[in-house]
Image: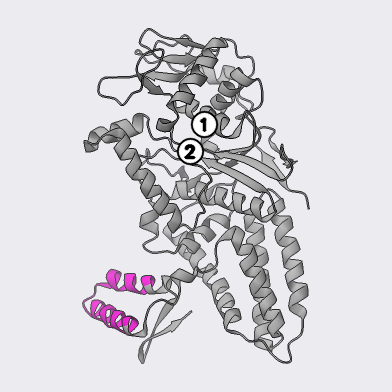
Amino acid sequence: MVLQVHNTLTKRKEEFKPIEDMKIKMYVCGVTVYDDIHMGHARHIVVFDMIVRYLRYKGYSVTHVTNFTDVDDKIINRSRELGVPALDLSKTYVDRYFSEIEMLGVRRADMYPKASEFIPQIVDMVKRIEAAGYAYATKDGSVYFSMDNVNEYGRLSGMKIEELLAGARISVDEIKRNPMDFALWKAAKPGEVSWPSPWGPGRPGWHIECSAMCMNLLGDTVDIHGGGNDLIFPHHENEILQSWSVTHKPLANYWIHNGMLQIQEEKMSKSLKNFFTVRQILTDFTKEDIRFFILNTHYRGPLNFSEVAIEEAATSLRRLHNTYDALKKSTGSAQGGDDALELVEKARQIFLSSMDDDFNSRAAISVIFDLARETNRLLTDGGLSSKGVKNIVDFLEEIDQVLGILPGKQARHDVSSEIIQVLMELRQELRNRRLFDLADDIRKKLLQKGIELEDTTEGTKWKRI
């Protein structure tokens, strides 16, 4: 099967051909670390985790780099609000980021470069761009990329430079020659974190850090450059310009962008104050619930967020988990046949063809649910042999290396019967006091641990699911 990837640069699906056989260099733009990651970030992180997992499942050797922007205006402003040094603030949220992606079952990238650790490389690249005639220094010690000599711009976004210019604005404190010019190096303002440079103390512009990191860690051209589609313009357009100006080579052969997570038809973002942090959502849902909610939509399309939508996803996923648990407990039937072998092979081929079609995880998940329905029928009818049970379990666990939606061992069945009984009594006391929200929190927490409570006329009963 041939892997097809939708390339933002060409606006079409293309056969994926790495620069070096079976080896992939992949750079994915990361987060600006001034707060906890929210569910919009989670979509981006889980999507590219899935893509890397699938590429490795296919046998590729992947070098995956994701950066941290650990110094910029947002970080500086937040550090002033909190009264802590900017780099201390960003370090705190880098540490929390790693904790949060672990909660999401995300496998770490191979490298996580930070802007603050790449200052010499960034300064060197700005010097090269200036020497090539594509940058100029201003009297305050800043350096801007000059658009005057650029003939082709907007290929990634599909926007023409004339359209961009028409909407451009120049604020009174800017000294750019062209409204489309952008900062490569920002002169330090009083009290800001800064580093020495040939133009005076300052810090990197936003776009230059990724070009410098990508080229220094992975070379002039990478196989895949990724990020959210909100980065296409201006961030990725400007990255392309910066890199081309010093190498005259493409920065990436394939550009992959995920769609935005939306809430009430708007992009979820901190600036709009319409976000939910990953830590908030994980109080009520498992990492498998969140991954399933995200991956059950094609990565390039928009995804509408609500707690109701995640609850519906969690309920659907629980049916799959019930089938998986039933298989794990089953010894098969002596009269069972070997239908499972054919079922698994058919499911595997459809799974692969779905994922090879631009990482279509939604279609791949549909295959798993089709298999689960047929499995339930066979289990009920006694039509699965012990070998058939093992074949299906092995297949589900095999492809879950890509999706990460089956119940994690550490999150299941680790609550003793005595503790369950105490929590049930506490829940009943809260219900008697009409503190229903708190009582429901106990039910949800137990459900995350694989314990289902059922209120009956004979009282509350529980079972492991």
Question: Disc 2 residue type?
Answer: Asn
Q: Name, please, the residue furthest toward the front.
A: 120
The image position of residue 203, as x and y in percent, is 38, 23
The quarter of the picture where residue 362 lies is bottom right
Residue indicated by mark 1:
213
Front-most of 214 and 161? 214
Q: Residues within 10 Å of mark 1 (few under 14, many from 20)?
A: many
Residue indicated by mark 2:
67
The image position of residue 434, as x and y in percent, is 24, 75
The quarter of the picture where residue 342 lies is bottom right
Front-most of 372 and 310? 372
Residue 464 position (above or below residue 182) = below
Marker disc for residue 128: none
Residue 266 position (above or below residue 444) = above
Extent of the magenta region: 419-445
Is residue 338 something that shows in the picture? Answer: yes
The image position of residue 208, as x and y in percent, is 49, 25
Q: Residue at x 37, y 81 (%)?
A: 416
Front-most of 88 and 298? 88
- Any magenta on residue 425? yes
Question: Disc 1 residue type?
Answer: Met
The answer to whether marks 1 and 2 mark residues whose Cβ atoms lie closer than 8 Å is yes
Q: Residue at x 54, y 16 (%)?
A: 128
Q: Residue at x 30, y 38 (%)?
A: 88
Secondary structure mostly taken by the magenta-highlighted segment of the chain:
helix
Q: Earlier in the sequence, mark 1 or mark 2?
A: 2
Q: Left or right: where does residue 164 sit relative to residue 345? A: left
* Colour pattern of the rendering: one colour
- Any magenta on residue 280? no
The quarter of the picture where residue 215 lies is top right
The image position of residue 14, as x and y in percent, is 74, 40
Q: Report helix, strand or loop for mark 1.
A: helix
